[in-house]
Amino acid sequence: MLENRFKSVNFIKPFATYLFCLLSYGSFSQSTEKQTILVEKMEYAYNSSITVSSNEFDSFSDSRVILATDPEIADKMKQSILTAISNRWNATILNPQWDLKRLGDFNKHPKFKTDLKKGTPGSWHLFLQVFDNGPYPITDKGSSLFNTYPAFKSLDYAPYYLQFKVSIVDGSNKAVIFSNEMMVEMQRAPLPAGQLLFRKLPAHTDSFLQAFDTVAQTLFAVNPQRELKLEVTPACLFLDTDKTLANAKKLNFVSKNDSIIELIQLKQEWIIQNTKTRKTKRKNNFGNNLFNSTFTSLTGLNTDKIRAMGYITKFGFIDTNDNTHYFCEIPFIEETREEKESEVTKEADGYKSYSNNLNGNIKVNRSINPEQMCYLIREKDTVGYFKLKKGDRIGSKNNLSQFWDGKNESSIKKTPDFWNNSESSISPYFLDGELNKVHFIIENGKGGNQTDIKISGQEIMTLKIYNDKPVFGLLYSNPPDEKTLSILLMLSTMPFGSML
């Protein structure tokens, strides 16, 4: 009897242990089951417009680089979002794709709609919106046609503003599982000495992605934040002058009062004088305008009324070492085209009358004759001449092909071609001429960030340009006539690009 009871106990104990393990496994399996989340909206809205102050005539807008439009970077940004959600809820996310939405120049903030039309029982539904407004603060009022914005080049040390909005809804009953709204500021760290900022990038791409990953983790945290400020590594232009040559002499420039430039090593100083522009004569476009009016009347298709005016801009500088004044005059034509459209009016007697009216759409273009000889005058004497030509010189390599963090060569990355295209507001140009009977070429390119000087076919000097002024340079070799180089250096700082 006692033996049978002992056998029963020995049987029950292993069975109970097995049953306990089975129940524990079942409970564990249920707790580790992944939650399905369906993406209803994963929107990246952005305002890419920036204000560019061009010159004394006008200002215009251009576009900055939106990193989310690069497929490889966008995919990494998406993975940051998915990882943050999975870390919080152990979820499987279905249909995660960015919906890129470019806002117009004067659009209000994008609306964040979280209406779930039809929920899936047992699943959650994700609504996510990122609003990238670049260096312009995000306010409740949004933007309007009458707002004015500072010039983009004055915002180098302004933070980049992004706003994140998220809502996760239960598909069974449309209850809100989670929601958050967070304002993010990405502040660039100070530039390394001697480096130039790649303005149109918010940060070096590696640093931007690290910051975005931090934002995603914070956005979906158990205790989410409403505001987040992060420091990011700025992207620097990797130019030819970053490849230091052993025999090259480094040059440093100092700007004073926005008009005086001092070259420390060569003990040179000069003053850039304000440009002066005057009208010359109106260009006759009677024949073209008559043809356009007739064409619009006959076909109903829009044409342009053309008005063209000739101008001359005077550029000058003063060599303070010998108190000598130099100047040159550049002629150009400014053409204004206003769109003309045909309007049909039905009279009371049933007849139709046709008239051509200007609709207010205006385009302004400037042109310079590339074969026009321009003369460099010292006081009253002509000492040189040159032709100013817009565009790349044959054989030049005007391409911002790489960028880096300004310190480590391992951070050098290739610049996609379409990023360079966004530098469209800054036209390359070059001067080809003679000074004191010596041939020279002054070439300004790479988005207005580099100037190269050649004398008698030999590359003499390369300058880094920042805010239209030289800040750093390399002198490769000393020319036979140092005075000629000194004058060409001063001439190279004239703001010729302002009229192109």
Image (cartoon, rainbow, N blue to C red):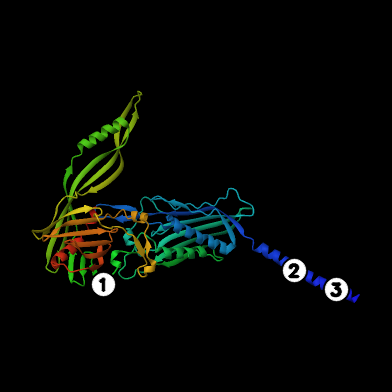
What is the spatial separation of the Cα atoms under label 1 and label 2, in whole angstroms? 77 Å
Residue 112 appears in the figure? yes
Question: Mark 3 or mark 1, which has the lower sequence index?
Answer: 3
Picture coordinates of residue 112, whole percent (x, y): 50, 53
Asked whether the residues under the numbered discs 2 and 3 touch, taking CB atoms below 8 Å apart as contact, a structural biologist would say: no
Q: Amino acid at mark 3?
A: Lys
Question: Mark 1 or mark 2, which has the lower sequence index?
Answer: 2
Q: Is residue 388 left or right of residue 212?
A: left
Picture coordinates of residue 264, whole percent (x, y): 21, 72
The answer to whether 49 is drawn above or below residue 467 in the figure is above
Q: Secondary structure at mark 3?
A: helix
Assign the N terminus to one quadrant of the image: bottom right
The residue furthest right is 1
What is the spatial separation of the Cα atoms under label 2 and label 3, in whole angstroms? 20 Å
Q: Secondary structure at mark 1?
A: loop
Picture coordinates of residue 164, whole percent (x, y): 48, 59
Q: Secondary structure at mark 2?
A: helix
Q: Residues within 10 Å of mark 3 (few under 14, many from 20)?
A: few
The residue at 26%/34% (across/down) is 293
In the picture, the disc for residue 82 is none
The answer to whether 297 is drawn above or below residue 37 in the figure is above
Residue denoted by label 2? 20
The residue at 20%/49% (across/down) is 368
Residue 189 appears in the figure? no
Q: Amino acid at mark 1?
A: Ala
Asked whether the residues under the numbered discs 3 and 1 touch, taking CB atoms below 8 Å apart as contact, a structural biologist would say: no
Q: Nearer the viewer, residue 7 or 92?
A: 7
Residue denoted by label 1? 246
* Mark nearer the viewer, 1 or 2: 1
The answer to whether 422 is drawn above or below residue 413 in the figure is above
Residue denoted by label 3? 7
Q: Is residue 147 left or right of residue 371?
A: right
